[in-house]
Amino acid sequence: MQNKLGVAILGATGAVGQRFIQLLENHPWFYVAEVVASSRSAGQTYRSATNWVLDGNPPASVSELVVKPLDANLDSVLVFSALPKEAAETREIELASVGHIVCTNASTNRMLEDVPLLLPEVNGSHLNLLQRQRSERGWKTGALVANSNCTAMPVVMALAPLKQFGISKIQVVSQQAISGAGYPGVASLDILDNIIPYVSGDEQKLETETLKMLGEFVGGHIQWLDSLVSATCTRVPVIDGHMVTVSVSLDSKPSLDEVIATWESYRGYEPVAMLPSAPQPPLEYHTQIDRPQSRRDRNAGNGMATSIGRLRECPILGYKFAALSHNTIRGAAGCSILNAELMAVEGYIPEFTPHDVVHA
Amino acid sequence: MQNKLGVAILGATGAVGQRFIQLLENHPWFYVAEVVASSRSAGQTYRSATNWVLDGNPPASVSELVVKPLDANLDSVLVFSALPKEAAETREIELASVGHIVCTNASTNRMLEDVPLLLPEVNGSHLNLLQRQRSERGWKTGALVANSNCTAMPVVMALAPLKQFGISKIQVVSQQAISGAGYPGVASLDILDNIIPYVSGDEQKLETETLKMLGEFVGGHIQWLDSLVSATCTRVPVIDGHMVTVSVSLDSKPSLDEVIATWESYRGYEPVAMLPSAPQPPLEYHTQIDRPQSRRDRNAGNGMATSIGRLRECPILGYKFAALSHNTIRGAAGCSILNAELMAVEGYIPEFTPHDVVHA
Amino acid sequence: MQNKLGVAILGATGAVGQRFIQLLENHPWFYVAEVVASSRSAGQTYRSATNWVLDGNPPASVSELVVKPLDANLDSVLVFSALPKEAAETREIELASVGHIVCTNASTNRMLEDVPLLLPEVNGSHLNLLQRQRSERGWKTGALVANSNCTAMPVVMALAPLKQFGISKIQVVSQQAISGAGYPGVASLDILDNIIPYVSGDEQKLETETLKMLGEFVGGHIQWLDSLVSATCTRVPVIDGHMVTVSVSLDSKPSLDEVIATWESYRGYEPVAMLPSAPQPPLEYHTQIDRPQSRRDRNAGNGMATSIGRLRECPILGYKFAALSHNTIRGAAGCSILNAELMAVEGYIPEFTPHDVVHA
Amino acid sequence: MQNKLGVAILGATGAVGQRFIQLLENHPWFYVAEVVASSRSAGQTYRSATNWVLDGNPPASVSELVVKPLDANLDSVLVFSALPKEAAETREIELASVGHIVCTNASTNRMLEDVPLLLPEVNGSHLNLLQRQRSERGWKTGALVANSNCTAMPVVMALAPLKQFGISKIQVVSQQAISGAGYPGVASLDILDNIIPYVSGDEQKLETETLKMLGEFVGGHIQWLDSLVSATCTRVPVIDGHMVTVSVSLDSKPSLDEVIATWESYRGYEPVAMLPSAPQPPLEYHTQIDRPQSRRDRNAGNGMATSIGRLRECPILGYKFAALSHNTIRGAAGCSILNAELMAVEGYIPEFTPHDVVHA
């Protein structure tokens, strides 16, 4: 028998860091033991160092923790990283090299060949890449696992069950919430009563991360899905929830009903169903013609489910539909936590076995 | 020498009717002489019958006009129709049959084979269809001319100059302003902090009207453009301005620079340049990577210009870009007025010649 | 031992009706047994009769209930009414007269002299009015209890603890969410990027209901608080949460610290603390200078707590502050449910004792 | 005969600086000759140095001007300052001391005893203070004139005509647009679907500037209005337009009709009516019960008029109403320009007489 596992949050004072802390309040396996941020915040209590931008207040259990500097030695084996890109690059590798399990939301190391871009239901088997990661880098127990860009998330969740039909072309137009840009992020003068037809960097991420995530672990590496992807990313005046409009060509020409049935029965990588943060089921198909909607459906499955709707024929690519995920839960902190849960049940976290946790 | 031409507005108290009245204030050729609405409003002054939803107040010159019922005989030769679909169907035909020039924004009669779906710069020559309309229907001087759906407008404006390259596939995702749904239209609870992935009827209109407008007048009828169109229409929390994200295949594979140069030099049907409501030029290409934006660009050219940006390669169809038009100006009332102006200079309005107007 | 108490919802398909149903999902004492709506909906399942405007979907347990017509005999002793004003007037009285306990959110009967305007923490003792209500009307076990206007709620919650200092003048400016107007309610064209300086009827309600709620049960009737109230009500582009800016004169001139301490220690009518929907504590005072905020604080205490902040001197009235309550939870359905819970523990619901409920 | 007067804009690249440039396009007397900004921008063309946040694009006539550094010697006699507070403090004084006429929107020097806080219709006679300013400071032809905080503006415009009735108490609650905070200003995550009950510094400004502006020039100085002011400032999700809810006590107890008549007939300081930027009339009283509204009325009089509505009895102070001004036009750049126009006709700008301007 053991207690819950204390974890560290890197970049704890930022918007995604706050979401980690919010989601880990009352988590059955993990609790926040260490909060880490830039030298500007280090030494202060979390409460005083943080401009809390989520609803309500920071959890009492974390408010009085003293923020550690970015270069501090950490006691926690499991580390969640919400660091900005530049800060993440070397620090995440350093921590993994000294034995930490680093689950990162940063984009920096995501596309490294030996880093799993993990979306548990879809590609839980990509964890096998860690064997190569450890052996090539000489790490014994450390590991670095990433989650994807928040906009690729609903695309991949919706397309994963359709891989069996053969996917050769994917056209995506996103409508992304402002929280995707962090805090302060998008100026209100730029987005109130407005649409911005561009999100820096996201189109390129969508066109590559999607294929890596949908790839197969074969012969010790990830073989990307062989498909064309065309992405357009836009910013809309919505707080949370990234909507994507997807057109896709499916080689074996399933009927619309077959596609819907495939989504509805999808459960993905089997061990995921038992994880505490896993939505049951991962996908919800809406038959109402005007769903999913950003505000009304972003919290499905506590923000971890993906909502799909409007499947119909596309005169050009064959099939089109809309999909939605909560960008800072499923698309960021929530996915990192689910990744860590999967690693826990698969034995990747040294000396920690979830079923032994004493629920205080 | 003569005075300005008095015109009648059908459906004058509704949102589009109000826009007609606003745009015709201080028009150099036309003035609002008659306002027509449902029996509920008839008999009242325009001011008291109307819940003015645009900025400011109704023009003083119209406020005291007494609203006429829908079945009233009209003195004005030129009639603008902002009637709802059902009311428009027979009344517009009746008025044209007794000699009125009816410029309609209603969707009902738009797709009739002998009704020009007029977008002056793009297809001014479609007015030639009126000869057939009049002869087949036995109308002497009356005519019925429509403008298109407000979402098709920016698509057609942007694609018209590209017809020379051969257009075979058009993929469109729209982000439509709430004013496109009229008043009261979209409930605020449905759209604040939300995206609705569906706009009733608009996808079908986009997939057909686009091809008719881009068609050629050949052998006495309109030969539609031969192209595949796939449309997805969404509603966004924006007051005015319909944004479209377009992917298109162009047979002759022009360079991106050639496409931009084609847009920048585009002037369209020659007589349009002299019309008072014509934007100069009709298209504006933005080089800033995050433009056009709904709020910042919808009023370009007094709401009559179309703004384009973000031209780049589409891995699937070859080319993609964003375009924006003001949906209730260029996409509705403003286009009808431009249509009427073109008809005036081309001699379709009996006993009215614009260059003789005395500017009081 | 007994099962949960089945309840009926009048006006179940409307916006407030939906909130009742959402809040009663998993309620420890009550469950929704009957849904009642207009003849247009009667006979259909709740799912098909309802355009669900809250997040997600209607609870599965209610979706398949068949909607009963407004004049149906009801099996449930406890009835929650979300009827529109006109429909409420006679039907609520009829139901109470045949033995139902009617907890209403409708404004119609609120100001009747023998109807408690119940806000449990503040004036739980007003339930004593029911003795008079029953005796004068000849009702044996039925009762009619109302909750207040959604904007009066945060004013009364914040002022109740201050009655001890003597309140002689109350100046209120509200900023009210769109959900306060029901569905479809406020047109999006009226409120996006806009403030409307008027909410029909609410100023008058605020200026009267406030005084009745803050009154004392003396000599068999409610003696209103003797104070001047001046209210201005505005509508703002916010989904949920009514903010009020209050200036108040306090006769005994407490220090600002005394006022804050009074709020922080406030628990109100003692039996309320044990009620399942009661927030603990009912009031939260924010020390951050820019709180409470509508979006970030409306869900405090599951939407049942009132958030207060910015207490400072008012050069004119002495004291000023901001307060916020969730208008469709604490200010409507949630308050009605809390009212019923108080009635249950005080023995007003025949043959139902909460502590005997079997929690299945 | 002479040409238009070239003017310099300090802080030209910021949000208010942009508004100056937009409003001066096609001004009949002035044109932008010099643009001045921080060293970061100096040396670049205005187009490349500026992130234009208003609608459309910067005027062509200004786009190619080279930005001068803050310490540059300026050729233009007339200087408009949109500098941030710190930068304004000494530079504005320096420029005035070497002969420039400085019309500033910065708050720094506003409350200096010898600086007129000019709102031309209301207190044009405060320009007499310049005699003292010049003599005490030893300036020959230079001058420093300020305009007020953007929220005080509608309060003062509405109250000025009521001074004749005796104003002893003023209670204000503001609902301020995001553009009042400049760019980037308010983070979208802070204001979408939200109200912030606090605007840093504005309550204090409102409680002092209001009294100075409503004061009288007597005996060589400004004698403030002797009245109590209590202000609460809030931020709302509106692009432009500051709404204020005002309660006021009027000693001579005029009828509501008298007050309205007073507003409607108000023209203010006589020379203002002939100024090109002066709205005709300065005040518009709305009889519609739900006006003024931020979006629909902010552009009244090209953004220079103040809209008033909802006058009714206040049970506490006697009178209450709503007023609205465009905060970056009448409340900032537009007011500074009107101030300069008044100074021009009153002979304060050396060697410049407006009626001699050649309109090219």
Image (cartoon, coloured by chain):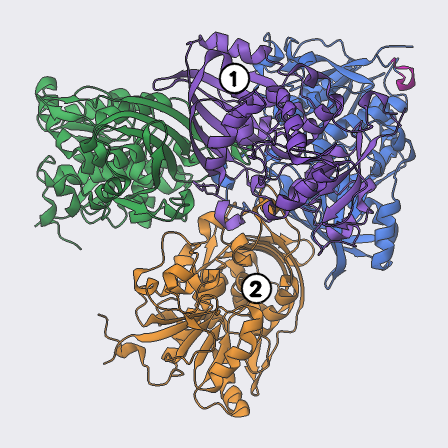
Chain colours: A purple, B green, C blue, D orange
Report the span colored magenta: C353-358
Tell me which amino acid carries mark 1. Answer: Gln
- Residue D53 is left or right of residue C258, and the answer is left
Please tell me which residue is depicted at 78% across the width and 43% down the height of the picture.
Answer: A74
Q: Is residue C357 magenta?
A: yes
Q: Quadrant of residue C15?
A: top right
Q: Quadrant of the C terminus of chain D?
A: bottom left
- The chain containing the residue under callout 1 comes to A
Q: Which residue is mark 2?
A: D152
When the figure is inspected, residue C9 is found, relative to residue B106, above or below; the finding is above
Separation of marks 1 and 2 at Cα, in angstroms: 49 Å
The local secondary structure at tag 2 comes to helix
Which labelled disc corresponds to residue A288? Answer: 1
Q: Quadrant of residue D142?
A: bottom left
Residue D64 at what x, y percent from top left? 32, 64
Residue D269 appears in the figure: no
Instruction: Give the camera-side residue of A165 and D80.
Output: A165
